Amino acid sequence: MLKTRFTEMFGVAAPITCGGMTRVGKAELIGAVANAGALGFITAHSAGKPEELAKELKRCRDITDKPFGVNLTILPAIKPPPYAEYRQAIIESGVKIVETAGNKPQEHVTEFRKHGIKVVHKCTSVRHALSAERMGVDAISIDGFECAGHPGEDDTPGLILIPTAADKVKIPMIASGGFGDGRGLVAALALGAEGINMGTRFMATRESPIHQLIKERIVANDERETELIFRTMRNTSRVAKNAVSTKVVAMEKEGAKFEDIRELVAGARGKMVYATGDADEGIWSAGQVQGLIHDIPTCAELVSRIVRDAEAIIRERLERMMSGGQRQAAE
Ligand SMILES: Cc1cc2nc3c(=O)[nH]c(=O)nc-3n(C[C@H](O)[C@H](O)[C@H](O)COP(=O)(O)O)c2cc1C
């Protein structure tokens, strides 16, 4: 078994998390992730109103008695979601782990920690990781440029971001963005992380609550099938490449403002993608790791395969290199 500071701190068997995913991080997926020995996060704002979140957490508790958490994504909005009420629902639910993402989490971090809740803050730069560490979070999840969703504006890929962060961050750190198999897990551990966070890979699992055709689209897509929208607004988002994303990127190049693309990027259209299986209906997030996704396993199969493959790489491939066994075999 792979034991890291992350597995010890959060009491899970595998050094793997399933990050918050709008419209995907629901009870059936996160419960299955927990039963597989990894740590998943129910996405607070996807549940709807705070009282709906409480019901979703109860639904997940009915699926698993293992640890799971909640993702609280704090994004600038004209009409912000009721963050304080979500926070209260989380505290009252008895969930003991939260993943925060986005801007200025201090107020939430302080409240959660006061109630004995551990906080993993997800960010996309070393400076934000250090600032979250100073705020008192328990662990960092750091997203490289490869990731689905918001990679930030620095464009630093994981191969640079993870070790530069590991040099400076003292609390346990999970590497995120572009991970999907045992090779990625070993690489993350070698770069100084204590585990991996995956989004896109968990979308294409049996328990993921999205249309089968979208899971199959992820399997069919290669690593080039993503696009960066909202670049011109400095709010970059990596999404699956489709008719809508290509149109949005073209309109942005022509100087379109948010108002001009609002209808194309509407959440209601993205929701239809998962409901109908029509991948061109709206915008949906997916990362470059699509190029490494070739099947739709159960969460249990996926997690155990990643851990098993990582252990085999460390024990066999890397160990053989250390002992010079490969040279001997070739001679
Ligand atoms: C469909 C989808 C929706 C996402 N929604 C959110 C979200 O609401 N909040 C958040 O913090 N991260 C969100 N993410 C990012 C993931 O939590 C994770 O950081 C990212 O997927 C990691 O990159 P990967 O997809 O290459 O594994 C989303 C990712 C996907 C694929």
Image (cartoon, rainbow, N blue to C red):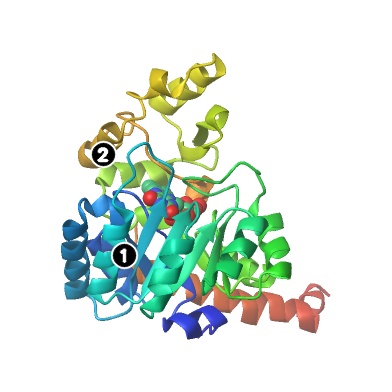
Q: Is residue 167 above or below residue 20?
A: below
Q: Give the residue at x 68% y 71%.
A: 190
Residue 242 % position (x, y): 41, 29
Q: Give the residue at x 22% y 60%.
A: 53
The secondary element bearing badge 2 is classed as helix
Q: Which amino acid does label 2 sit on?
A: Lys
Q: Give the farthest residue toward the top.
A: 254
Q: Looking at this view, is 109 or 231 the one in front?
A: 109
Query: Which residue position is annotated with label 1?
Result: 298
**Closer to us: mark 2 or mark 1?**
2
Is residue 246 shown to the viewer in this render? yes
The secondary element bearing badge 1 is classed as loop
Is residue 303 shown to the viewer in this render? no
Residue 291 % position (x, y): 52, 47
Pointer 2 residue Cβ closer than 8 Å to ligand 1: no
Left or right: 257 in relation to 34 = right
The residues bearing labels 2 and 1 have C-alpha atoms spaced at a distance of 23 Å
Q: What residue type is labelled 1?
A: Thr
Q: Is residue 19 above or below residue 291?
A: below
